[in-house]
Image (spheres, helix red, strand yellow):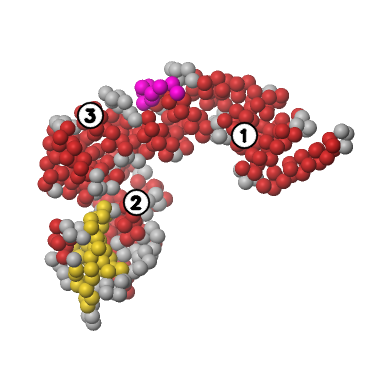
Amino acid sequence: MKCTLYTQKKQATLVISKLILFYQCKIICAKGNTGAQYYLIFHRDRYINAIKTDHLKPESFLFRAIEQGMTIHRAHPIVYDLLKQSPFAWTSARQVKKKTHRLQPDMEQVTILSYFDQYIAPKTIIELYQNCFRSFKREGQLQKAYQSLVHLNRYQPNLTFYQDMIAAVEFQNYHTEQSTDSVTDPIVFALTMKENDSARLTSQLSSSWNTDEWHQLWLLLQNYPSRVIFTTLEHMLRQNESLIQEPPFTEVLLSQATAKQFFNTLKKQSPFSHLINFDLFKQQLDALTVQRKISLLKNKPNYFINLIQNFSMHEKEQLIKPIVNVALQTESIPLVKQWLQDLPFNISLKEQLATMERFEQDELHQKELANLYIEFNNPLHAIECLKWSLAIDTDDLSCYKQLIELLRSTNQEQEADVYQNQLIHLARFRSLFR
């Protein structure tokens, strides 16, 4: 499969290897006669320009598209449709850069330019999105202002500017409405609204469950990235909430979710009529941020209890212990102990924390307290306990050795060397009296 690329002075015949779909962009990957790599960029279905490079910049739009987008290899109806525009004109990078200086606030034009951050500075793209936002907000076009923030965050996630602006009161309603709108992803839109087989199946399953139709849809969805699968199924779930009670549907939905999506889905849709897979639940729990883990016990105990109520006692303990591990790094033992006391089932962690609370103010049990902290993967608190123990008993060789090992494991080499020298002197002193 071939296409032609031309400039004012010459033309080249390219051999097409694959097509990549990423948000509103389509990218034809092709090679020239010399082996040079070309990327033909389309916005929706309209050809824009080409990029020639053998070395993609990390985190550039092209790099992310190849990493995260959907890949279609060679012959496919979509590719043939795009090739109807051949031969393709190739404009120099210098001319594309000039557009950034003349550009008026236009979100679509900025989005198109973002495809070319292989040679346009990302800072320039960010500033153009910010200019769009300010212009729309100044004119009172809050919907467009919000969309410019969405595009900015998609291009460069979690910028301070985005975080500050999206938190503004006037955008709260837009945020709630748009954050779950699958139509913002054109691939999902095509799956649910345009492509015949998938559109028919998603529509029918959104009305009523049918196992055969589900198997057909799942065969189609398996060719797409996780984000597309999850968003497509979430779109269907909004049409028919009873789908969450179907184990095959729920299993796929939750397995394709990020940790945040996983727990948000459970919060909105539980309880289920079937068990949640334990390994998947633990994997998603482990992927949560420290603060989100702690909040499950600190702020949402009833929600968490409902989530884990069908797991065995051993499984419950496996899920709660990692939360206790991180909680003990910043919270007091009595407070964490109280969180566990509020749980309506008995686990050994409650006894361990009760023991730790007794030992905490007892200078004669600091070594034992250190060992309990180690069990909760908390070496820094264990180090402080061992130092306290050595202040009481300066001749405890095993305490020295344990402290030195912990200091080295936490990259506190200089302090470890100090205690190592003390241990050497103590050992020599003892040998004199044997």
Pinpoint residue 371: horizontal percent, then vertical percent: 62, 29
Magenta part of the chain: 306-314
- Is label 3 or label 1 in front? 3
Image quarter of residue 86: bottom left
Pinpoint residue 386: horizontal percent, then vertical percent: 68, 33
Above or below 165: residue 321: above
How far apart are the two marked residues, 2 and 3, measured between alpha carbons? Answer: 34 Å
| Residue named by callout 3 | 246
Residue 300 sits inside the magenta stretch: no
Circles 2, 3 touching at the beta carbon (< 8 Å): no
Task: Name the residue: 40% across, 22% down.
Answer: 312
Pinpoint residue 299: horizontal percent, then vertical percent: 43, 28
Quarter in which the N terminus is drawn: bottom left
Above or below 395: residue 351: above
Pinpoint residue 22: horizontal percent, then vertical percent: 27, 54
How far apart are the two marked residues, 2 and 1, measured between alpha carbons? Answer: 39 Å
Q: Amino acid at mark 1?
A: His
> Could you tell me which secondary element the residue under label 2 belongs to?
helix
Q: Residues within 10 Å of mark 2 (few under 14, many from 20)?
A: some
Quarter in which the C terminus is drawn: top right
Residue 309 sits inside the magenta stretch: yes
Q: Amino acid at mark 3?
A: Glu
Task: Name the residue: 24% across, 73% down.
Answer: 90
Looking at the image, tell me whether mark 3 or mark 1 is earlier in sequence order.
Answer: 3
Q: Amino acid at mark 2?
A: Asn
| Residue named by callout 2 | 153
| Residue named by callout 1 | 381
Above or below 338: residue 287: below
